[in-house]
Image (cartoon, helix red, strand yellow):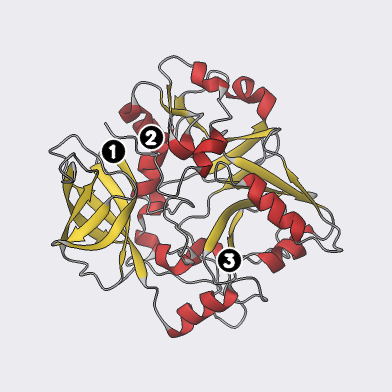
Amino acid sequence: MQDTTTTAQGDTAQDDTARWRSPLLARRGAVDGSGPDAGVAWHYGDPVAEQRALAAGRGLVDLSHRGVVTVSGPDRLSWLHSLTTQHLRDLPPHRSTEALVLSPKGHVEHDLHLVDDGSTTWITVEPGAAGALADWLHSMRFMLRVEVRDATAEWAVLGQPVRAESAPGEPLAWSDPWPGEAPLAEGGSADTASYAVVSTAEHPGRARPWRELLVPRAELAERVGAEPLAGTWAAEALRVEAWRPRAGFETDHRTIAHEVDWLRTAVHLHKGCYRGQETVARVHNLGRPPRRLAFLHLDGSGHDVPVPGDDVLLGERRIGFVTSAARHHELGPVALAMLKRSADPAADLVVVGGAGEDGVPVRRIAAAQEPVVAP
């Protein structure tokens, strides 16, 4: 069976996360992940039961391979407000939000899961990304009263199928806002936008509550205690079902936020300038994204699951590539894929990947598409 946590974005994340091996891998039945999710459990022996438990709101997921960056100091929120896509200047304590760091051309570089505790802003990022983010933030400090730390060595992340901010006595939590949209700004103008083919009320992400708990890394096993655990296989399958983009999976070197419907939770359309804003505004106001995310229902008659990076064909013409793939406990094999915007949304597709000695792809899987971003 193919590993559903492989990424097509190179080996950097794999090299970084290979340095960490979670103590929770000592749990009975634990199977180590690979690629960006190496170092934490892919599953604990029964990924289908683990998915069902998460879908029912039970269990924890070891995400201790994620990076943690902290920003403290009186200027922290106004400073982060000026650097990212999100309105952060007046962020209340214990109010979770999401922000992107863009390149000067508007391509997604980092996805920040962000919550402030009243004195420090806590940010979790993809495995291997904390060092690069902290270095960039350091370079942007100038004379402002902020302190940036890569706190990954001291703090670990646990995933939980709950949609709630942290309560008194709980570890600090980042509650995933997906797929909610920001309320209207003063005057009735939308702070953000949805590119999805369905309304927020009908969005499959509403059925996936999720948050990340921050716990001292040295106390990870103790904090988990006897709680049931689910692996990244289960968590990723539910993420794919929810159309939830993940940096390094649904993003490559030219991804813009519109292509994966990230404006709905991570981009504020009525705030001051930030790096990459021109692209965000131009595409939103004057054009359409060149590519679109789609959800694929895959033929499950075989044993193969696509690998991220596998080609998606319309006839024999390549129109995109797989970004994430998983085996869902109810839907069977499913995937997210980045496709050309012009591709017929009603057309049946084929996913191909790998190559035998004769150069013929070893995987050829029929796929029916369900558009995520409207074509």
Taking 185 as reference, is 315 above or below it?
above
Horizontally, residue 110 falls left or right of residue 203, namely right
Element assignment for label 1: strand
Residue 94, can we see it?
no
Disc 2 marks which residue?
A: 233
The first of marks 2 and 3 along the sequence is 3
What whole-number distance in Å separates the C-alpha atoms at marks 1 and 3?
33 Å
The first of marks 2 and 1 along the sequence is 2
Element assignment for label 3: loop
Badge 3 amino acid: Ser
Taking 366 as reference, is 81 above or below it?
below
Disc 1 marks which residue?
A: 327
* Labels 2 and 3 touching (C-beta < 8 A): no
Horizontal and vertical percent position of residue 64: 57, 33
Horizontally, residue 240 falls left or right of residue 168, namely left
Q: In which quarter of the image is residue 44?
A: top left
In the picture, the quarter occupied by the C terminus is bottom left
Q: Which of 62 and 6 is in front in this view?
A: 6
Badge 2 amino acid: Trp
Identify the residue at image location x=70%, y=38%: 168
Horizontally, residue 151 falls left or right of residue 205, namely right
Horizontal and vertical percent position of residue 297: 22, 50
Badge 1 amino acid: Arg
